[in-house]
Each structure stands twice: as structure tokens, then as C-alpha cells.
């Protein structure tokens, strides 16, 4: 992996160090690590998207509600705890929440879920698409390698509207007939609430699998949800090595890898970089994704890809 050093000053390129594709590639499958196969040679045919924190800005709602609950007990909701809850089924997350916050015996998991549910209802109805990268300068690391997200590229990303940041990739893949689905740990009733304002995007998906669907015995990092989602594609069974999963949560990344699939991570900017482990590629935004790197039809526009 080489690095590209560019420079921008007074409208010209200035001292920026970045990965050639402005992304982190780590922990590729064994054959890729040996240099015997590249992303482009492992042509992807099917795509899976997580939803919360990747397509929809719902993690913010969970954070707001859980901060309110903990404040009553004089406690704070820390990012270290949030990272453990992301991507989990509600019942599993509730157990961890109560244990990690020292509320075991004071607040039961069932009581926590009931209180949280009541507060989340209105927030879910108004959730928005993910806004994209929040910071223009951010150091990322993977196995000791550090890159700095290019300032010039980040400024370009900010030119896209919130809607474009999410829909650009989904619309592109849909136009080219690439089968896509959503695989979310959210229960079906929550999924319906969260997507109330986003039916057009969801309609582009071949199917949606939710955390309470029959056939899912264990939540992420178990591979159950992704294996079930793969079975629902037309023409199944699909070679798992031809499926690319987009995730924001460490548990989701682990679930995708446990399912034998490739995974691109678009993490919360506040997530500890040590939790990127396992992802085949790490990006700051879906806008950074280059379909051609994975054997998919390339974008027609070159505004982002040329940087």
C-alpha cells in the first residue's frame, strides 16, 4: 500500500498524506493478504447494508435517550459503552447496559427497555439520513499504519447534501441492477418507524431482514442475520465470498466476517480505532467508497474519485 502526498495552498494542493484511495484496508482475507488476489479480482455481486448509524442517523437517538436515563442515577453514557451496544439485539444490549453501568439490581433490563421504548418512539419518526463525515481532519490507524484524511477531499464531501451522501451509492447500485438488502438488528416495528420518511431508498432493496425475524437465533456478532439475508436473495444460495457488507459497528463487522463475507466499515468518528479490527476497508463516509475497487460498476462522476 502506497501513500500519496499532495499539497494544497491558496487553492493549490497542500501537504496532505493519505491512502491512495483515502481509506484503510486491513485484515483482508488470507489470500488477499498473501497478495494472490485483489479486491477487483474478487468481484462482488451482492450488497448488504446495516441501517442504524450507517444509512440512518438513529444512533444519535439511542444516545440521547440513554444519557437521559443514566443522568437520573448520576452517571454518564460513555463512548466505550456505546461501542459495546452498537449492532446488538435490544435484549442483549439491555443486559450489557445494566451491568456495565452498575445498575444491576436497581434497574432491570426489562425496565430499561420499557422506558427507552417510550422515549424513542417520537425520535424514530423524525430520524434523518446519515450526515456524512463530521470532521475534516482525522487520524486513522490499522496495524500501526496511520493516515490523515485529506482536507481537500473532506471539503468536497461537504459539498454533497445529506441526501446525496447516502443515496449516491444506493441509487448507483440500483441503477446497475446490483442486488441489495438491509440487515438490521432493529425489530421490525422499529424499522417501520425509522424508515417512515425514507421509503424511496428502502424500496431499492431486494429485501429487509430485521433482528426479530424468524430464523435469527443470535444477534451480532453471530453471523445469523447475514446468513439469513443471503438466503433471501433471488438465485440463492449466493457465494458468501461475493457478498459485501457495509457496517458501522464492531459487532456487525465481526458478524459479517463470521459469515464469510467481505466488510466495509464506516465507523462513528469517536470510535476507538482499535475497534476497526477485522474490517477489510474503513471509510469516513459512503461517498468515499469506490465500487470499481470491488469489481462493481464505477461511478460516472469523478469529483471524489480523482482525489
Image (spheres, helix red, strand yellow):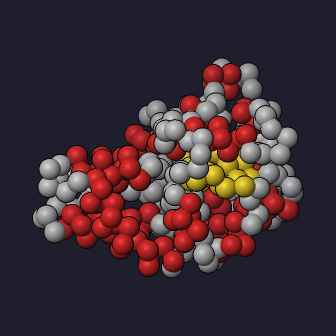
Residue drawn at (33%, 64%), measured in percent from left and top?
Answer: 114
Relative image position of residue 305 (x, y in whole percent): 73, 57
Residue placed furthest toward the front: 214
In the depicted structure, whether residue 231 falls above or below residue 179:
above
Counting from the top left corner in percent of width and height, residue 276 is at 47, 42
- Observer-nearest of 21 and 278: 278
- 300 relative to 3 in the view: left or right: right
Left or right for 32, reference 177: left
Give the image location of residue 244, x and y in percent.
69, 43
Observer-nearest residue: 200 or 14? 200
Examine the rendering and report whether any part of residue 293 can be seen: no
Label tally: 0
Quarter of the image with the C terminus is: bottom right
The quadrant of the picture occupied by the N terminus is top right
Picture residue at 13% right of the left edge, 64% below the top? 73
**Is residue 204 at least partly visible in the picture?**
yes
Q: In this orientation, which residue lies closer to the viewer: 247 or 28?
A: 247
Q: Residue at x 75, y 66 (%)?
A: 203
Of 276 and 94, which appears nearest the observer? 94
In the figure, is residue 278 to the left or right of 235?
left
User: Where's residue 134, x and y in %?
Assistant: 47, 67
Specify the quadrant of the image occupied by residue 177: bottom right
Q: Quadrant of residue 150?
A: bottom right
Classify residue 230 by image quadrant. top right
Amino acid at each position: 500500500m502506497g501513500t500519496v502526498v499532495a499539497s494544497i495552498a491558496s487553492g493549490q494542493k497542500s501537504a496532505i498524506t493519505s491512502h491512495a484511495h483515502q481509506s484503510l484496508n486491513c485484515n483482508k482475507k488470507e489470500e488477499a493478504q498473501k497478495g494472490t488476489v485483489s479486491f477487483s479480482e474478487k468481484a462482488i455481486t451482492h450488497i448488504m447494508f446495516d441501517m442504524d448509524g450507517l444509512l440512518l442517523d438513529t444512533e444519535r437517538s439511542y444516545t440521547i435517550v440513554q444519557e437521559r436515563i443514566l443522568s437520573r442515577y448520576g452517571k454518564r453514557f460513555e463512548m466505550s459503552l456505546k461501542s459495546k451496544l452498537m449492532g446488538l439485539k435490544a435484549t442483549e444490549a439491555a443486559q450489557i447496559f445494566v451491568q456495565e453501568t452498575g445498575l444491576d439490581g436497581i434497574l432491570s433490563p426489562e425496565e430499561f427497555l420499557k422506558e427507552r421504548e417510550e422515549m424513542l418512539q417520537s425520535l424514530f419518526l423524525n430520524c434523518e439520513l446519515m450526515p456524512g463525515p463530521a470532521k475534516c481532519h482525522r487520524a486513522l490507524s490499522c496495524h500501526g499504519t496511520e493516515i490523515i484524511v485529506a482536507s481537500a477531499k473532506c471539503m468536497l464531501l461537504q459539498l454533497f447534501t445529506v441526501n446525496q451522501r447516502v443515496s449516491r451509492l444506493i441509487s448507483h447500485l440500483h441503477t446497475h441492477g446490483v442486488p441489495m438488502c438491509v440487515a438490521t438488528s432493529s425489530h421490525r416495528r422499529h424499522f417501520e418507524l425509522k424508515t417512515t420518511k425514507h421509503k424511496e431508498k428502502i424500496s431499492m432493496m431486494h429485501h429487509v431482514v430485521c433482528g426479530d425475524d424468524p430464523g435469527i437465533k443470535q444477534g451480532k456478532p453471530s453471523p445469523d442475520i447475514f446468513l439469513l439475508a443471503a438466503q433471501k436473495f433471488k438465485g440463492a444460495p449466493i457465494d458468501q465470498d461475493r457478498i459485501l457488507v457495509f457496517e458501522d459497528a464492531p459487532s456487525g463487522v465481526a458478524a459479517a466476517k463470521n459469515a464469510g463475507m467481505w466488510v466495509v466499515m464506516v465507523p462513528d468518528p469517536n470510535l476507538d480505532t482499535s475497534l476497526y479490527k477485522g474490517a477489510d476497508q474503513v471509510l469516513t463516509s459512503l461517498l468515499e467508497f469506490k465500487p470499481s475497487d470491488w469489481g462493481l460498476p464505477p461511478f460516472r462522476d469523478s469529483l471524489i474519485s480523482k482525489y
